[in-house]
Image (spheres, helix red, strand yellow):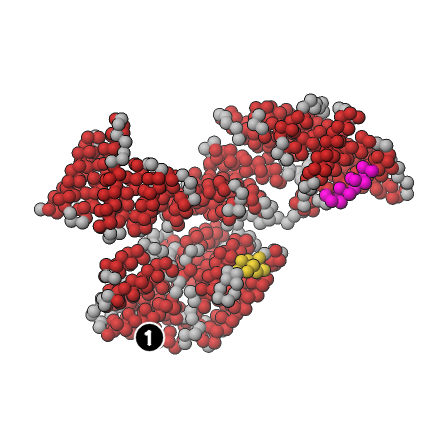
Amino acid sequence: MSVDDVYDLMARAGELPYGEARTVLVEDALRQAEAAAEPELAFRVRMELTTAYQYGGEPAKAFTTFSRCLSEHDREPGRYGEEHRLLWHFKWMVNSLTLFPEIPLDRTHAVLDDMERRYRLGGHSLQAVFHYRHVVARHVGDAAGADEWYARWRAAPRDDLADCAGCDPTGMVHHLAVLGRDEEALAIAAPVLSAELNCTEQPQGILTALLPVYLRSGRLDEARDAHRRAYRIMRSTIADFADVAEHVEFCARTGNEARGLEIVQRHLGWLDRAPSPHSAMRFAASAALLLRRLEEAGAGAEVTLRRPAHADRPAAEVTAAELRADLERAATELGARFDARNGTSRQGDRVREILAAEPLVDHLPLTAHDRRPPRATAAEAVAQAGGATEAGRSRPVADHGADDDLDVLLDAADDHWTEQDVASASAAWRRFDEVAEATGAELTTAQRARRGDGRGLELFMNGDPEAGLAEWRRAAELYAEAGDTVLQHSVLSRIGGLLAGLGQAEEGLTLLTEAVAFLDEHAPGTRRARSARLRLSGHHLESGRPDEAIVVLAGLEATEPREIGDLELHRAQALARIGRHEEAVAAVRQALEALRTLDDPDARGQAAFLLGQLLSHASGGPEVVAEALAAFDETLAHAGQPRLRLAAHAERGTLLLSAERAADAVPDLVEAVAGMTAAGAHAPAAHARVELAAAYYTTGRHFEAAEVAEEAIPVLARDDDPMPHRRVRFILAHSQRELGEAQAAETFAELAGEEDHPGAAGQLLETAAELLTALDKDALAADRFAESAASFAAAEDVYGVVRTRRRGALCLLWAGRGDEAVEEMSRARAALAELPGDGADEQAARTWETSMVAYDEARLLANLSRYDEALRSVGEAIAGYTALGENEAAEAAARLQESINDELS
């Protein structure tokens, strides 16, 4: 291996984020430099390796590389020229030494003394020395010492060895926050928060330090934003593990247990490879607090977490209680180790404080759609169990307290049920039971049948279909015994519908069909015959047989508003399923017109919702959109059922988004996501999040778009339909790009890898490459451009091949791989021959692409000092641009030509 190979490894490492992959390349470079017997180069690489260990979450390894560099520098002080960096690294070493309880405290003080000696000899300010003496004092709980060193730190002048303009105040905020001096902390932080910082640890460091300050001082909006911004930056950096723990504690103390649980699950594996015992202690304590808060909220028994394998421990699902016990024990034991080393109780006290911490805020919503699930009322519990409620009902429950006639009560209950007034029907049945018990009356067979029929309905509505089925079977037998075959077959129809719903489709369909046939013959035109047909058509519709549903409904007529509404809603749904859209819309309009005359807001809301759905999913102009929006407005104005209202918000928001009214769509979609999430309807909430993410992105709210998209991805990944999952990841990728996040390139590349069409894959890979080169990751960008060119070639898109090979060549140049750059540009030029050139437009396009290749080729060759060749290429570019009338491009090429001539002269 040569010295060039070392530089190549270091260049490749420099394009990667800090972490294992980057560290491995630098370690390899060090081995190669040592093997090449290049001590100066090895020294510089070793210095870089110290940095890689520090920011890559392996500070213990940095002790060795730092010590070696320091020793070599002291042996030959003038040879390596890295004294300033060594003095800077002293700060890292002092801080890291406190994080390992096995390292004696005397050693930390010795390193601090050596640091101060060297700073004094170099004529440097002691500001950084005072800073880190304060850090050690604060760590061991020496309050007086911490205050003294803090004062000297603040008073000493800053110089180029002081921590950056963001990190220095961050340390001060930490001190002031512990003392509860929140206003001072905020004053120190203010200039930092408004500054543009170029530091690996900022702004996430100071935002995290400010979390308790914001909460205690009532600045809840700032606390929310600080958490969201800081955690998003640090969540992929294991070196920030201790700060991640701060965010877990924040969630536990602000009523955001679900968010905290997500963070704990995401980072639980880091606990086994924590950067230091101190960060492990901090995370274990905060995670245990979070799990305790979950248990106290009543959710702990239901929660399990996936703990990854480590060493001899296999991967396993563990309960929250089990994990909490393990984490409490680990944090407590680590705290005791630190206290034994330090001779104080400070670290153990801090663990105990965290484990016993109480909320600072009952619930701080982190997003507009973040709401706590409300405690379910009895009626809502029924609905969640599969029954129904009359939430939002406007009609009062009928009073039957004065009725004593059993048959009158049964008739009243029947009438109430027909009107879908479940509460009044139940009141009549309860009164029946009271009268029958009080009088000791011997019920007739017909009365027992009717009461059993009603009891079955009540059981079904209360979420016990099996018990309801048993009551209905007994009622059918009693009806037959009483000679009322019409009511017998009416209840057999309900039994058939229930059996079909319980998965016994064959028996259910038989009963449904036989009941329709019997009632058509023996009770034609009656409500019971009509209900049986509606029930059979509904079964066909649910079973994917809309054509048969329409046949069952054929010839069925109704005169009463409720009957018209029920019939036409069934017909509309069946017609919509087979694509007879206009007829479906006409049917639901008829249903809605009838239901508007009744005092039944839920039925009216249901019909209006279906009309809105049909219209919003159809092609049409502004008039159709307006009618659909009006229908959803009507749903929201009248429907009381929470699920229907949330669905209306979701559909309305989606319609507004498709109508290019994204800002108007956001409030509806926020309401839908919030309500669905609070109700535990995670799948529909995830789909609504896709639309909300799109709306946020369209309105330029890229941070919110990325956050919402990431919330949806885990749920949609399990969806049978892959398209929503793919769509939301597209939104995420574009949002990440707008936010300038490096992960965007990876997301685009992942999407390209799943793309079936090579042309689309080429475009995605090209976007990934553009993002990488914008981040000065030119070697990686060159690889992506090459992959993109291959995809475009597979799609027979020659323009794409030429463009990406040309751009890839420049990336190779910037990555210091000149020879490869020339080869890649040659491939771009060769691909020009494949461009079409028959028509005038095609000839112009070909001239443009040729000129672009010639111009960039000239830039490349000039950078390699191949000036004569560069002049030929730039001349070709000038001629091409001039022929096309592209004067600005021609002038740019002429300036390049002039600069090349200057080099030659």
Q: Nearer the viewer, residue 598 or 721?
A: 721
Residue 548 located left or right of residue 123: right
The reply to whether residue 302 is in sight is yes
Please name the residue shown 30% across and 51% down the image: 779
Please name the residue shown 23% across and 36% down the image: 850
Q: Does the magenta stretch include residue 476?
A: yes
Magenta stretch? 465-477
Q: Nearer the viewer, residue 589 or 444?
A: 444
Q: Is residue 791 magenta?
A: no
Residue 603: quarter of image: top right
Principal SS element in the magenta part?
helix
Q: Nearer the viewer, residue 830 or 91?
A: 830
Label 1 CA crowd tier, 10 Å (few <14, some 14–19, many 20+): some
| Mark 1 element type | helix
Report the amino acid beneath label 1. Answer: Asp
Task: Please name the residue that numbered disc 1 is placed on.
Answer: 113
Residue 749 located left or right of residue 512: left
Image coords of residue 327 (percent x, y)? 53, 65
Image coords of residue 404 (percent x, y)? 87, 37
Quarter placement of the N terminus: bottom left
Image coords of residue 853 (percent x, y)? 23, 39
Instruction: Please tell me whether residue 18 is drawn above or below residue 577 in the rendered image.
Output: below
Please name the residue shown 69% across and 45% down the image: 382
Instruction: Please tell me whether residue 103 is drawn above or below residue 240 in the rendered image.
Output: below
Residue 839: quarter of image: top left
Image coords of residue 713 (percent x, y)? 49, 47
Instruction: Please tell me whether residue 319 is drawn above or below residue 626 in the rendered image.
Output: below
Please name the residue shown 32% across and 48% down the image: 783
Q: Which of 723 and 95 is in front in this view?
A: 723
The reply to whether residue 431 is in sight is no
Residue 861 located left or right of residue 552: left
Count of marks placed on residues:
1
